[in-house]
């Protein structure tokens, strides 16, 4: 329960310095001037502060985004960011008040999905966000590894260019590709400034970004210099690799892996990055899967029909959602030819779950059958969990390549 001394409102320009200070202190960081990169994307009418009297003690923002969902469709998503509470004011309900205000606002404006990256795994389930809606593969591999015979490299010339030259090409390429990849988000101009901000302070001893273009894709990376008695040991840190053809993917990876003076490539990539199967020895690719997007179904009946499903289903799903009570109760979920219809029903439930479990499975990143084994889903009618599992799973692992 929120403390009764607290109030909440959207921000004005004059709140920005204090908004930034609270953010910085909460993240154990230093404010670095009001041009701090995250502030560039904050939408003032969707950012909130919590006050204790006149003192700003909490912050949160929603970014208006589109997310690609299974079926190659785009759904509106509220991208929740900079949820922070000033040290000294924690555990008195400030974050809960921010979460409630955001989710009620999204419900009223008809935006059926909320997404976020969690700083800690123990915070957001209580607010109905499901973990691992997308996961991230922290991958490293030696450079120079050979490809499996039969993986073609076209010999297309790849050009390293300046950021200015790369930007128009990257904007267009990204906007085409993101519409085809489940979990990818659209970018507004300020997003590019944030995602590819190249401030000295963010480089951690690495070079500035390098931009390399292929006619059907691009790659952005930094290099970390290294030497050893055995020879050059530079590391390539890939920031993003965006390709609209499989050929460009093979060409750009080959280009990176053949870079002189390097020993290792690292890339926070999709869980199912095909590179694992492109190299001759898959054990040379080390992988570490972590949670990425957490997803919240704001409105069950609006959200579920937004995507396409892999098989037909007719099930009654009982949802428990004390934080957004309009979702609680039983819903008939019928899929025919990939399209879902969701209606209220009084019929007995085939399957029961909570809002967070529904958020985890929405993009196909988590199997409902696994949540059943984890005691997070209850099956009342045998067979329905398996049927729903197959319907929700798609042809690729969902992936969100950017932190917001
Ligand atoms: C999307 C993003 O922006 S991710 C970034 C999140 N922010 C940070 O990590 C910055 C540092 N942390 C903070 O600023 C704060 O501790 C926050 C925002 C995580 C939580 O704010 P608070 O105002 O303390 O949370 P609030 O008092 O509403 O707590 C609600 C519940 O969550 C629990 N909770 C809150 N934070 C945590 C945590 N870090 N770990 C475990 N439980 C937590 C509380 O114990 C409480 O539980 P209860 O309902 O059972 O009593």
Image (cartoon, rainbow, N blue to C red):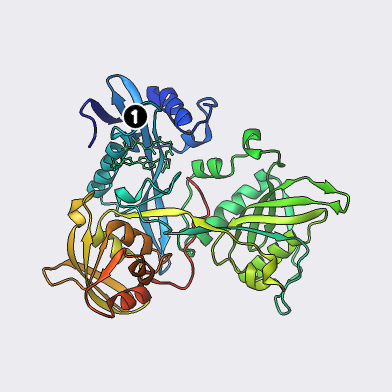
Foreground residue among 390 and 113:
390
List the residue tagged with mark 1.
11
Q: Position of residue 371 (x, y in %)?
A: 35, 66
Q: Residue furthest left?
A: 346
Where does the image place residue 331, in percent across and percent down from the top left? 19, 66
User: Does 202 sit above or below residue 77?
Assistant: above
Question: With 322 as the anchor, is 56 left or right in this view?
Answer: right
User: SS at mark 1?
Assistant: loop
Give residue 267's quadrant in the image.
bottom right
- Residue at horizontal 22%, vertical 37%? 1
Q: Is residue 309 visible?
A: no
Q: Residue at x 59, y 40 (%)?
A: 197
Quarter residue 315 falls in: bottom left
Quadrant containing ligand 1: top left
Q: Would you place residue 89 above or below residue 102 in this image?
A: above
Name the spot of residue 305 as percent of width and height, x first: 29, 66
Whether residue 335 appears in this view of the structure is yes
């Amino acid at each position: 329960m929120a403390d009764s001394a607290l109030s909440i409102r959207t921000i004005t320009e004059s709140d920005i310095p204090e908004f930034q200070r609270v953010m910085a202190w909460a993240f154990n960081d230093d404010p670095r001037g009001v041009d701090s990169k995250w502030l560039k994307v904050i939408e003032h009418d969707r950012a909130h502060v919590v006050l204790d009297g006149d003192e700003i003690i909490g912050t949160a923002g929603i970014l208006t985004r589109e997310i690609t969902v299974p079926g190659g469709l785009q759904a509106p998503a509220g991208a929740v960011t900079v949820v922070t509470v000033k040290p000294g004011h924690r555990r008195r309900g400030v974050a809960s008040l921010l979460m409630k205000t955001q989710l009620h606002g999204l419900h009223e404006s008809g935006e059926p999905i909320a997404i976020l990256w969690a700083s800690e795994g123990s915070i957001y389930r209580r607010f109905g966000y499901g973990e691992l809606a997308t996961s991230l593969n922290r991958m490293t591999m030696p450079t120079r590894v050979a490809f499996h015979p039969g993986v073609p490299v076209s010999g297309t010339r790849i050009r390293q260019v300046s950021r200015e030259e790369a930007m128009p090409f990257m904007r267009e390429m990204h906007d085409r590709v993101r519409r085809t990849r489940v979990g990818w988000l659209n970018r507004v101009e300020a997003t590019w400034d944030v995602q590819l901000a190249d401030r000295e302070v963010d480089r951690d001893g690495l070079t500035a970004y390098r931009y390399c273009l292929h006619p059907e894709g691009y790659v952005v990376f930094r290099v970390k210099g290294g030497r050893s008695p055995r020879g050059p040991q530079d590391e390539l840190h890939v920031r993003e690799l965006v390709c609209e053809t499989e050929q460009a993917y093979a060409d750009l990876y080959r280009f990176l892996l053949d870079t002189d003076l390097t020993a290792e490539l690292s890339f926070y990539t999709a869980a199912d990055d095909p590179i694992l199967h492109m190299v001759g020895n898959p054990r040379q690719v080390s992988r570490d899967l972590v949670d990425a997007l957490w997803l919240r179904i704001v409105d069950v009946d609006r959200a579920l029909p937004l995507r396409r499903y892999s098989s037909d289903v007719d099930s009654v799903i009982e949802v428990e959602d004390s934080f957004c009570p309009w979702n609680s109760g039983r819903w008939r979920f019928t899929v025919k030819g990939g399209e879902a219809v969701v209606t209220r029903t009084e019929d007995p439930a085939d399957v029961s779950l909570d809002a967070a479990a529904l958020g985890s499975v929405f993009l196909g990143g988590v199997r409902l059958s696994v949540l059943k084994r984890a005691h997070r889903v209850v099956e009342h009618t045998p067979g329905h969990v398996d049927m729903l599992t197959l319907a929700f799973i798609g042809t690729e692992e969902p992936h969100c390549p950017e932190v917001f």
